[in-house]
Image: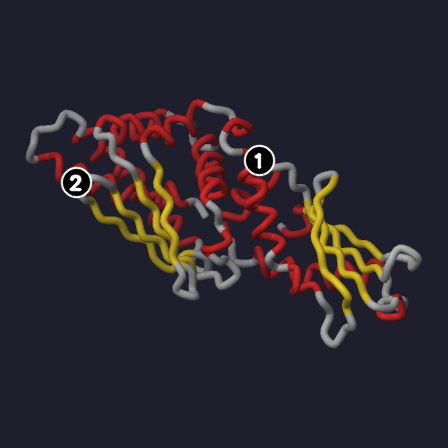
Amino acid sequence: MNFLRLAIAPAVFAASLAFTACGDKTTPVIIEQSERINSELQTLVEENPQLLSEAKSSFAEDKIAIDVKIADSLFIVSQISEPLFNYFTACEIKNHMDKNLEITVNALSEKDMPIVVSLTDVYGDSHSYELTPAILRRMVKSPLTQLDYNEAREGLFAALAASEAQFIPANAKVKTVSTSFKGGFFAYNVEFENANAYKELTTANLKARALQVLEPRYAKLGTLRPVLFGMYKTLGLDGFHLVYSAGEKSPSLKTTVTLSHLH
């Protein structure tokens, strides 16, 4: 979800046209950068139609407003916290630390103009995230560990935990489902009422069950999959565990799905 690159191009272009009449010295620079980014924007949308259905922008005196509609039903806007969104944007900025980025951020800073990104999911829910010039500069200059790292990781884990019910087998008698994180792996822990519910399963069977849930989650990301997984890596997430158990006295069954399994 390369929202900053996706959003900034047409908005900056609109802003540059508005400043032209005033003879603003920044206008030619903004126009040049907006043309370059707009071309990249079109390619990004064309390559990822299953993830992004629409992106548009408008310019007002006090902000650049960006509207992005997500096409993938597995992405729920209410689960994308502000620290997580900002951290993802920071990762993207650091992956594109070139002269063009510097020029663009400087132009926005000169006008003290925020970018307000509004995300809408397929369920009609929307949320807005404001990226002020100060925030953008902090993303450029500060290491990721100083960019709300812990809050972003908490937001990611909360979003992952929201899907825990998907790991409950059909017609199974389950006592609880919980999540945990240790050693780079986010675990979905399914506790059954009786170990007989899974005694005939093998590790391979369990991995197949895990993939039935995890693969669709990332299937529609297209060219943005390595971008998201890159963010996962910076937050210390290497993959997932699925664990079946029936209390402390019963044997458990565990499988591992690394991010490489989901490529």
Q: Residue furthest top?
A: 141
Residue under numbered circle 2:
61
Amino acid type, callout 2:
Glu
Along the viewing direction, whichever of 33 and 17 lies nearer the viewer: 17
| Gap between marks 1 and 2 measured at Cα | 35 Å
Q: Residue 118 — which label?
A: none
Identify which residue, 130 or 198, lies in the foreground. Answer: 130
Q: Amino acid at mark 1?
A: Asn
In the depicted view, which residue is nearer to us: 135 or 220?
A: 135
Q: Residue at x 73, y 64 (%)?
A: 209
Q: Secondary structure at mark 2?
A: loop
Q: Which mark is residue 150?
A: 1
**What crowding class fits label 1: few (fewer than 14 Cα within 10 Å), some (14-19), or many (20 or more)?**
some
From this view, report whether residue 79 is shown above or below residue 183: below
Residue 61, above or below 105: below
* Most distant residue in the bottom direction: 171
Say left or right for 110 vs 214.
Answer: left
Residue visible at 72% across and 60% down in the picture: 177
Q: Residue at x 35, y 53 (%)?
A: 68
Residue 4 on image: x %, y %: 38, 41
